[in-house]
Amino acid sequence: MIIKGGILIDPIDETSRRVDIRYRDGRIVEIADEIKLDGSDTAIDATNFYVAPGLVGTRVHLREPGYTYKETISTGVKAAIAGGYTTIIATSDTEPCIDEVSKLKDIYNKYEKEDIMVFSSATITRRMDGETINNFKDLRDNGAIYFSDDGMVIRNDMVLRQAMLDSKDADVPIAIHEEDLDQIGVCGISDGKYSKDLLLKGTPVSAETSMLVREIELARETGAKVIIQNISSKESVDLIRQAKASGVDLVVEISPEYFSLTENALPLNGTNAKVIPPLRSEEDRLAIIEGLKDGTIDIISPNHSPHDEVDKSYDITTAPSGMIGLETCLSLAITYLVRPGHLSLEEVIKKMTLNPARVYGIKAGTVDIGDFADFVIFNPDIQVTYSEFQSKSENTPFKLLPLWGKVLTTINDGVIL
């Protein structure tokens, strides 16, 4: 098979050039300015389209087992394919949660049947109780890509410190959620204008920054590789920038809503704009973009969090937080980062492919001879409106909103999906 005439984005050096790509038996065998077709070749015409490594999603709630009315492995994978993803890492906050080797093996048996590469994280603590640390080495040896209690907060400083030491010893990243629950009134809503209009106490910035200060100091002391899963405020960007400059080994992920929306989306979209951490001010949104520009924020990945229509129909104080994101992530990055001139397309692709692959130790995110033939082919200049989704859920404020950038083809191991 040959991909003809596409503009190949190389995330390693953040360049792009028009080439032909030949692959065979799931591996890239030739990249050249022009490759002649022989009698056995089939061609994909990618003229004037961009070709990039398949996207890598790092925080995907597949909801199986336990919440299959919201999403299943199969529907989540279909959503990933529609969004250009060939590699995803599923979160471990299922029911039961992935906190022991037998559960990890069971879930991998299901993942192996899917058309793309699906990895799993594992929880930091048993039953996500915040106290009993799992055996990280056993979980690592059976496929755990990182450790996280996801949206649960580990309140005990000594437990978190030991977990960081154990993750360093296992040479696997540990991912932390930044919220001091004692400061929060209603989660998923910023303690700002919208919450005041509703006469509610929301989530203040200090609920995020106070925990972040703790995580930074523990990471500094232990030397662990710590992943910060989403931040929402200018103050957090500043704290992380300073910590990185001083040598703390932090990785920061951001999902698109934080560079695309502000708390003004809540009165317009209701619970579909309710996320954790909450959407905040325009100043905070612009600070997130600055963090992406200067490298403070390393990874762009959706926190794909499907919820069914019934759950999202509850009032703003009780409805669950989260939105889907696999299908819209690339379009949102193009619309809100590339077209306004904040980041180049090459920089965006690097943060969606090579950076997460390197952080999590996955063989993905590059396009070179011998690499897996995993690609996304897309056109950033096509306007697209998402009216239907491959995900089982549709909880997103971006439904029916015109965006830029259309995924045309997803190829995994040389197979057009």
Image: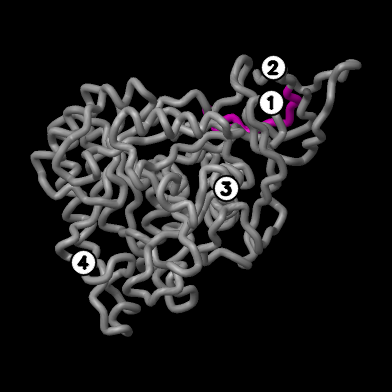
Image position, residue 400 (x, y; %): 63, 67
Mark 4 — residue? 184
Q: Please name whichever residue, 219 or 315, is drawn nearer the observer in this view of the structure.
A: 315
15 is within the stretch colored magenta? yes
Q: Which residue is mark 2?
A: 25
The reply, left or right, for residue 93 in relation to residue 28 is left
Query: Which residue is at a point 15% across and 46% down the rendered structure image?
Result: 214
* Callout 2 secondary element: loop
Task: Tell me which amino acid carries mark 3.
Answer: Thr
Q: Which mark is residue 207?
A: none
Residue 383 left/right relative to 15:
right
Residue shown at the point (57%, 39%) measured from the top left: 85
Q: How far is disc 1 from disc 4 in space, using C-alphas?
A: 48 Å
> Residue 188, position in %: x, y?
33, 65
Kindly check if marks 3 and 1 are in contact, taking CB atoms under 8 A apart as contact: no
Tag 3 secondary structure = helix
Label 3: which residue? Answer: 75
What element does badge 1 sit on? Answer: loop
Residue 198, horizontal then vertical, whole percent: 31, 83
Q: CA distance from mark 2 to mark 4?
A: 53 Å
For mark 1, what is the residue? 414
Measured in 3D between alpha carbons, the distance from the residue under mark 4 to the one under mark 3, in whole angstroms, is 33 Å
Residue stretch in magenta: 9-21
